[in-house]
Amino acid sequence: MTRFLKHFRYVMGENPVTVFAFSLFTVILFMGIFGHWIAPYDPLATNTAMTLKPPSWSHPFGTDHLGRDVFSRVIVATRLDLGIAVSAVALSFLIGSALGCSAGFWGGWPDRIIGRFSDTIMAFPLFVLAMGIVAAMGNSVENIIYATAIINLPFYIRVSRTEASVRRNAGYVNAARLSGCTDGRILATQVFPNILPPMMIQISLNMGWAILNAAGLSFIGLGVRPPDAEWGIMVAEGATYIVSGEWWLALFPGAALMTAVFCFNLLGDGLRDLVDPLRRT
Amino acid sequence: MDKTPFLNVDELSVEFRTRNGIVQALEKVSLHVEKGEVLGVVGESGSGKSVTAYTAIGLLDAAGEASHGTVTFDGMPLTDAREADLRDLRGREISMIFQNPRAALNPIRPVGKQIEDVLLRHVQATRQTARDKAVAMLKKVKIVEPEQRYWSYPFELSGGMCQRVMIAIALACDPRLLIADEPTTGLDVTTQKATMDLIRELTREQNMSVVLITHDLGMAAAYCDRLVVMQKGRVVESAPVNDLFAAPQHPYTKKLIAASPGPNSTLEELTAVPDEMETANMAQPNVAPLPKRPKTAEPEKLLEVIDLVKEFPIKSDNVSLLPWRNNGQEEQAFRAVDGISFSMMRGESLGLVGESGCGKSTTSNIITRLMDPTSGDVIFDHRNITTHSAAKFARLPERMKIQMVFQDPTESLNPRYSARQSIAQPLRHLKGLRNRKEIATKVDALAELVGLPGNLLDRFPHQLSGGQKARVGIARSIAVDPLLLVLDEPTSALDVSVQAVVLQLLDQLKRDLGMSYIFVSHDLNVVRLLCERVIVMNRGKIIETGTADEVLNNPEEAYTKTLVEAIPHFEPRTEIERQVSAL
C-alpha cells in the first residue's frame, strides 16, 4: 500500500495535467457522493414565486421555469450521471475484456464468432442503437446503463483481443503452461493483468462518452424522467428558454457535462501510469 | 598520426536525464579512426558503445546531452554543428547500419525506392538515373535478381536480405565513414559471415573507414584492424587486434577474452565473474538444499523421439475466396519438422544445433508438450506422452518432469510478477504447495542454488539485469525437480561474461541434480561446452549426429562444415594471414 502511494505521488509529480485531472475527478466524486447534503436547496422543491431568476448570490446558477435552484440540481445530478457512466463502463469493461481476451487468446472459432458479434454492433449508428434498446426494453435508468454498456462493448473487445493475441505466445505464458496452469488460469493471471494499461486509457475515454451518451438519451426524452435532476434533461428543458434570453438554464448543466467529460479524457494517461508495473521503479 | 585523425572523438561525456537523476552514459571517451581503418568498439550491453556512435553523428536521444568534449570529422566539428549541416552529412559522408534491419527499413515502401530516396536526398542522382543506380546498388550487395527485388517490400525479404538492403542504402552515396551498430545481431552464423564479408569487401574497395560496434569478440577479431574496449561509459583499452588478444592490458579486457568461448576452450576456463556477482558475494552456491538423485548404475533410456512430424498450413496465393472453388486444390502444408527420430539417455545432455527455421524450436516445443505434433511419438520415461493433447498435458504428473528455460529471459517473466512469484508459480500449481512459509523457504533455497541474492527476490523483472533474470528463469524451471530440462538458447540474449556464468551454473546443476539437458542453440561453441552429443538439423531433418567434439572438429556433412566455419574465429591471426586476407 505504501508502495502504491509512493508510486501515486511519483505519477502525480511527473505530469501536472494528471494532477489537474485527478483533482477535478476528486471534486466530481465528492459531489457525486455528498451532493445531496451540500446542495443548498432541495433540487425538487418548486417555488412559483422565484421562476426564471438569473444567477444571483442566493441562487448562483439562477432558477428554472418551476423556480428550482439550478445550482443544487447540477450538484445533485452528478450522482446519477456518474452512476450511469461508471456502471455502464464497468459492465462493458468486464464483459468486453472477457470476450476479447478469449477471442485473442484462443483464436479460431471463438475469435470469429466474437469478432463478427462486435462488428454487428459496430455496424449500427451507436446512438441510434442505444435509443432503440432503451425504447424496446423500457424507459428506465437500468436500461440506459445496459444500452450504454452494449454500444461500448466492441471497443473493449477489440482492444483486449489485439492485446491478448500479441501475448498468447509470450514466454511467460508458455512458462505458466509449463508450470501446469490451465488455459483459463493463464488467461486470468498472466494475460489479463498485462493488458490493463491500454485498457485503462479505453476506460477513461469511455467514461466521457458514457456520460455524454446518458445525457444524450435523456435529452431526447429517454431514460431519466423529470423531475429527476440529470444534466441531459436539464439541458433539454433549458434549451427552449435560450431564445427568450434565459441562458443559465442550459449553460450550467452543459458546462458540468463538459467538465466531467474533459476530466475523464485527461485522466487516461495518469491511470495507465498507475497500473503499469514498468513505471514502478 | 601526423595530423588530426579522420574521425576524432575527444574526451566526450554524455549525460542522460532520468527519473533517478542524471546518469552519466559516457565519461571522457576518446577514440579516433583513420582513413581506411576498421575500428572495432567492443563492450557489454550498457557500456556506452552505441551512445558514442549516436552522439558522433548527432542522433542522440532528446534526454541525452553531450556535456563535455568534441567530435570532429575530417577537421569539421560535429558536436556543435547545425542540424541542417548534420543532415547533409549523414548518408553522404557518414552512414550507419542499424541493429535490426527489418525495423530500420520502411515497411510500406519498396526497398528500391528507399535506396532512391537517399540518392535523391543527397543529389547523387536525378529522377531519371535514380532507378538504375538503385538497381546497381542492389546488384553490388549481391542480391539476386535486383530488378525484381527492387519492388520487394521488407517483409518479403529474409533478415539477411534486409541487412543487405540496409548496406546498399548506407553505401549508396559513397560515404567516407560507415558506422555499423551490431549489424548481425539476430542473423544466423552463416548469414552473419556473408554479411560481414560483404561489408568488408565493399568498404575495402573504396578505402572507407568503418566503426564496427559489437559485443562479439570473435567477430571483432576477424574483421577489425584496431579495437577499443569500453566498460561503463569509459574506454579501458585501445590496441591493434593482434596486440589486444596476445597481451590484453586491462583486467576487464582479460575478463572479456576469458569469458568468450572459443573452439578449444573448456567450461572451466571460462572464469569470468560479472560485477554484480562480485559485489553480492554470491559467486558460488555451496549449499545444495535439493536432494541429489541417486545415479543409476546402467544408463537408461529417458527420451525417445520416433518419426516426429509437424506441419503448419500455409496460405497459397491462388486460393479462391469462394470455398467451393477450392475443391480440387489440396491444402498446402509446410513441414517444419520432417520425420526426425533420436533418443537420449538419463543424465545425458544433447545439443540441438541448426540455423533459424531448421525446426529445432518446434522440436523442443513438441518435446516440452507446448505444441501438438502432426504425427510421431515422444516416449518419455517409458510412457508415450504424445497421446495426450498439449492442453490436457498441463494437468498430468509428467508435466513436472519436463521443464524448459526460455530464450529471452525478459520476455519469459511476467512483468507483473516479482521474481519470488515467478519462481513460486510451478510450486503452487504443479506441486500443489499452499503453505506460504513452505513456498517461501523453497524459493529461498532455489534462489541460493542458482546464485540469486535473496534481496532481489521481491523485485520485478524490469528491475533485474539480464543475468539475474536468466537465473530467475532457471530457478523456476528446476523448482519441481524435472528429469529433463529443455534449454532453448538460454544465453543468446546475454553478454559473454554473464553467459559464461550461466553456462557454469547449468553445468553444476546438471552434475548436482542429475538432470538431462536438451540444449537448443545455433552457437556450436556454446553447445560443445555443455553437451556430450550433438544433433545438427537443417530444414526439419537431422543431417548429422555425433559426439560434440567429433561434429565440431571433423564435420562429415557439407552443411555442418559451413556452420562450423562461419563462427567468427577468435585466435589472433598471424601477420602473413592478415596480408593474405587483405589481398
Image (cartoon, rainbow, N blue to C red):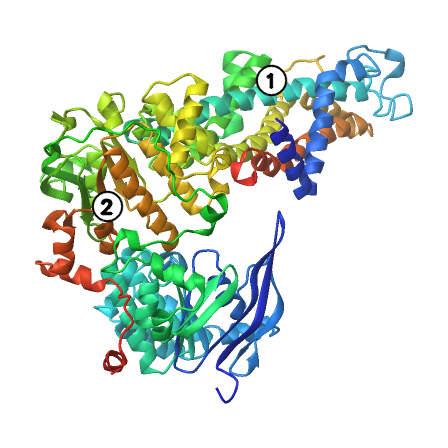
Residue B442 vs residue B403, the one in the foreground: B442
Quadrant of image for the C terminus of chain B: bottom left
Chain under label 1? A
Tell me: B205 left or right of A237. left
User: Residue A123 falls in which quadrant of the image?
Assistant: top left
Chain under label 2? B
Identify the element where label 2 is drawn: strand
**Residue B379 visible in the snapshot:** yes
Density class for disc 1 (Cα within 10 Å; few <14, some 14-19, many ≥20) is many
Residue beneath the point at 36% across and 24% down: B427
Among all residues in the image, which is located at the extreme bottom? B2
Density class for disc 2 (Cα within 10 Å; few <14, some 14-19, many ≥20) is many
Report which residue position mark 2 lands on.
B520
Report which residue position mark 1 lands on.
A222
**Residue A98 visible in the snapshot:** no
How far apart, in angstroms, are the residues tagged by discs 1 and 2? 65 Å
Q: Which marked residue is nearer to the observer: mark 1 or mark 2?
A: 2
Residue beneath the point at 11% across and 47% down: B541
Q: Position of residue A210 (x, y in %)?
A: 58, 26
Residue B456 vs residue B143, the one in the foreground: B456
Residue A81 vs residue B435, the one in the foreground: B435
User: Residue B483 falls in which quadrant of the image?
Assistant: top left
